[in-house]
Image: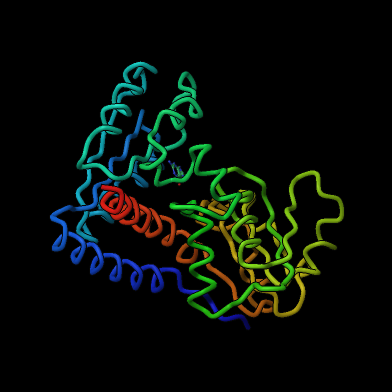
């Protein structure tokens, strides 16, 4: 039976560290790290995510602003808000909650965020920096995965890692972070032939495709580490990941549950990036 990786516990510990670091930073500089979150429209899942980001800021002692805009907000109105936050000294991190309503071009909006405040690490400058390995912000979910591995002393150096999914938010940056940690990385996707053959070679499998219980026990090797970034509903409407947990738990050495695995780490990494941004700004003054 696998060790179940406790993302809630790891996350709580890191948030305590961030809180202490933020308090020390504020004492020294008089500056409180500040995060602005923009949400456009009333997507219910996004509302919950945004509320949790606000709560997390409170928990670690950050200043936060949540800007709730109506679904018919124009590109010009949204850009005006982004530009005003870019020049607002109280704000060190800006996050535009995705998805945006269809009439708004997400790439254009992200490109207009000051990349020094882009705590999601979605701006092309930050994406490029991650590629080179010279970064200020790590993308939150992939960074959360790396922190979980670290917390359980799982070293990927020299190991075969398969990342399933090639999104700009998770799959691609996850592959890059694994590479920076000296793993041998294979990125798999919907066109991959013989997926199970690739996965059965992998010491670590990261699933990020958004398909409920897709990964079965016969697709992994004995004692594989299984990381589940998926967040889906099963046939009974219950929250589940991309991994068939009941099956894979019996064969894996470590496994993340859904919920309570990678999920709690994402917002924690957002807090970490916001603190880094505030510190960076001071170091440049
Ligand atoms: N929507 C779902 N996850 C995320 C995220 O990490 N960042 C942003 N901006 N929007 C999201």
- Quadrant housing the N terminus: bottom right
Residue depicted at 44% across the width and 52% down the height: 137
Residue depicted at 72% across the width and 61% down the height: 185
The one nearer the camera, 106 or 177, is 177
| Position above or below: 261 against 39 | below
Residue 219 image offset from top left, x and y in percent: 78, 66
- 233 left or right, relative to 65: right
The one nearer the camera, 121 or 135, is 135
| Position above or below: 70 against 129 | above
Residue depicted at 29% across the width and 65% down the height: 18
Q: Quadrant of ligand 1?
A: top left
- 170 left or right, relative to 25: right
The one nearer the camera, 227 or 211, is 227
Residue 79 image offset from top left, x and y in percent: 35, 22
Residue at the farthest front position:
285
Residue 92 image offset from top left, x and y in percent: 29, 45
The one nearer the camera, 93 or 189, is 93
Count the marks: how many? Answer: 0
Would you identify the image quadrant in which residue 265 lies? bottom left
Residue 168 image offset from top left, x and y in percent: 59, 43
Would you identify the image quadrant in which residue 202 lies? bottom right
Would you identify the image quadrant in which residue 217 lies? bottom right
- 11 left or right, relative to 261: left
Q: How is the image coloured?
A: rainbow
- 14 left or right, relative to 23: right
């Amino acid at each position: 039976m696998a060790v179940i990786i406790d993302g809630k516990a790891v996350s709580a510990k890191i948030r305590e560290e961030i809180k202490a670091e933020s308090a020390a930073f504020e004492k020294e500089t008089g500056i409180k790290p500040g995060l602005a979150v923009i949400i456009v429209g009333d997507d219910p899942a996004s509302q919950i995510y945004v509320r949790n980001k606000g709560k997390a800021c409170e928990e670690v002692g950050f200043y936060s602003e949540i800007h709730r805009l109506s679904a018919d907000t124009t590109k010009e109105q949204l850009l005006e808000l982004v530009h005003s936050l870019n020049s607002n000294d109280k704000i060190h991190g800006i996050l535009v909650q995705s998805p945006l309503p269809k009439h708004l071009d997400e790439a254009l909006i992200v490109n207009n965020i000051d990349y020094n405040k882009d705590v999601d690490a979605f701006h092309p400058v930050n994406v490029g920096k991650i590629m080179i390995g010279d970064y200020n912000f790590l993308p939150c979910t992939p960074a959360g995965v790396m922190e979980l591995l670290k917390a359980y002393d799982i070293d990927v150096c020299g190991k075969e890692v398969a990342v399933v999914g090639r999104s700009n938010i998770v799959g691609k940056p996850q592959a890059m972070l694994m590479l920076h940690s000296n793993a041998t990385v294979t990125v798999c996707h919907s066109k991959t032939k013989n997926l199970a053959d690739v996965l059965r070679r992998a010491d670590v499998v990261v699933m990020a495709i958004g398909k409920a219980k897709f990964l079965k026990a016969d697709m992994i090797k004995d004692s594989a580490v299984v990381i589940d970034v998926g967040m889906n509903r099963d046939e009974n409407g219950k929250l589940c990941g991309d991994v068939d947990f009941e099956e894979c738990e019996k064969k894996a050495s470590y496994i993340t549950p859904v919920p309570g695995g990678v999920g709690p780490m994402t917002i924690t990494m957002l807090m970490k990036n916001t603190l880094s941004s505030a510190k960076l700004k001071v170091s440049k003054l």
